[in-house]
Image: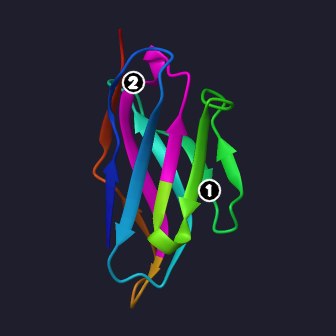
Amino acid sequence: VQLVESGGGLVQPGGSLRLSCAASGSIFRINAMGWYRQAPGKQRELVAGISSGDSTNYSDAVKGRFTISRDNAKNTVYLQMASLKPEDTAVYYCNADITVPIYGRTDYWGQGTQVTVSS
């Protein structure tokens, strides 16, 4: 199973970006999915999560500005980011809890995509 992220880049403060993360491989079922981020010198932190039933949760830092969604037909999770701030600058990682053959439920991570918010 692979998680491939896209959509990162450089954006000015107040701007928007949409991140995508597509899962591929031998997948029985994708359970929860989420986005984490890690800024230089800081620990990786949860940004937003979405359950298989589309329940969502957000960190206080992004609540009201970011929206997580998923397209089960495409095995893809999205993170729509708006009103971006310099403190949102980080490497963003996709995470998915996936049920796969033989191993059952397994945690997978994407390779990360850089988001830089700067003027």
The residue nearer to you, when weighing 106 against 110, is 110
Distance from Cα at disc 2 to Cα at disc 1: 22 Å
Tell me the quadrant of the picture where the C terminus can be found.
Answer: top left
The crowd level at tag 2 (other Cα within 10 Å; few <14, some 14-19, many 20+) is many
Q: Position of residue 15 (x, y in %)?
A: 47, 21
Q: Secondary structure at mark 2?
A: loop
Residue visible at 68% across and 46% down in the picture: 57
Q: Is residue 42 above or below residue 79?
A: above
Horizontally, residue 38 falls left or right of residue 46, namely left
Q: Is residue 61 visible?
A: yes
Q: Position of residue 26 (x, y in %)?
A: 35, 83
Which stretch is magenta?
78-98
Q: Quickly name the residue at label 2.
A: 89
Q: Amino acid at mark 2?
A: Thr
Q: Is residue 85 above or below residue 33?
A: above
Quarter of the image for residue 21 reads: bottom left
Q: Residue furthest bottom?
A: 102
The residue nearer to you, when weighing 6 against 97, is 6
Q: Which mark identifies residue 50?
A: 1
The crowd level at tag 1 (other Cα within 10 Å; few <14, some 14-19, many 20+) is many
Quarter of the image for residue 95 reads: bottom left
Q: Position of residue 65 (x, y in %)?
A: 62, 29
The residue nearer to you, when weighing 59 against 115, is 115
Asked whether 89 falls inside the magenta stretch, the response is yes
Instruction: Give the main secondary structure of the magenta stretch.
Output: strand
